[in-house]
Amino acid sequence: MQMKRAGFLVLCLVLAGCVNKSQTGQKSLVTPLPAETAAPQATQPAAVENTVSLTANETCTKELSALQSYDQRSWNKYSSEMSELISKTSQFLTVRDDLNPKINELVMSVYDSRMKTLCYKIESTLGQAMVAQASQL
């Protein structure tokens, strides 16, 4: 059980990447290519940013891990949801370069929304469990 959980957390962290860097709005230090080839490259950073936002961020995975010690049943539920969502997102990411950009954008929005919703549920459930435990003192 511990090995599966450790493997799951490693997978989440690997897929999470550097979410915080994309949220701070840092500019790339890479010099753009000449105008002839700059147009195809201009869409690539946005695609990378969207890929990063499709994965669970570090805070979300830490909250999910913390939830295990407060509410095992909720942890089981959200852990399996997270695994399924990461699996489906990974499957999409393997074929997204072959898709129409409009479809790609639509599907990426759906996955991003589902991940944010799941992370909110995890955060909310953890907060409620912590408050419930504190109020029992």
Image (cartoon, helix red, strand yellow):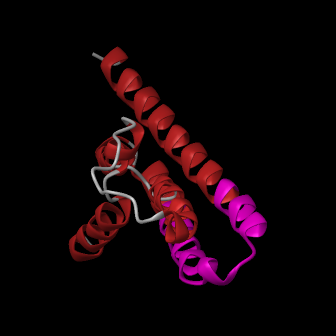
| Residue 80, position as x, y percentages in the image | 50, 65
* Viewer-nearest residue: 92 or 32: 32
* Rendered-image quadrant of the N terminus: bottom left
For the magenta stretch, what is the residue range?
81-109
* Viewer-nearest residue: 68 or 86: 86
Side of 10 where 91 appears, left or right: right
| Residue 115, position as x, y percentages in the image | 55, 52
Specify whether residue 59 is painted magenta.
no
Please say whether residue 63 is visible from this viewpoint: no
Side of 10 where 97 appears, left or right: right
Instruction: Name the residue located 45 percent from the left edge and 60 percent from the top edge.
Output: 79
Instruction: Name the residue located 56 percent from the left edge and 45 percent from the top edge.
Output: 116
Tell me which corner region of the image, top left, top right, bottom left or bottom right, holds residue 12: bottom left
Side of 50 where 123 appears, left or right: left
| Residue 113, position as x, y percentages in the image | 64, 49
* Rendered-image quadrant of the C terminus: top left
Tell me which corner region of the image, top left, top right, bottom left or bottom right, holds residue 105: bottom right
Please say whether residue 50 is visible from this viewpoint: yes
Is residue 128 shown above or below 116?
above
Side of 10 where 86 appears, left or right: right
Q: How many marks?
A: 0
Instruction: Name the residue located 50 percent from the left edge and 64 percent from the top edge.
Output: 38
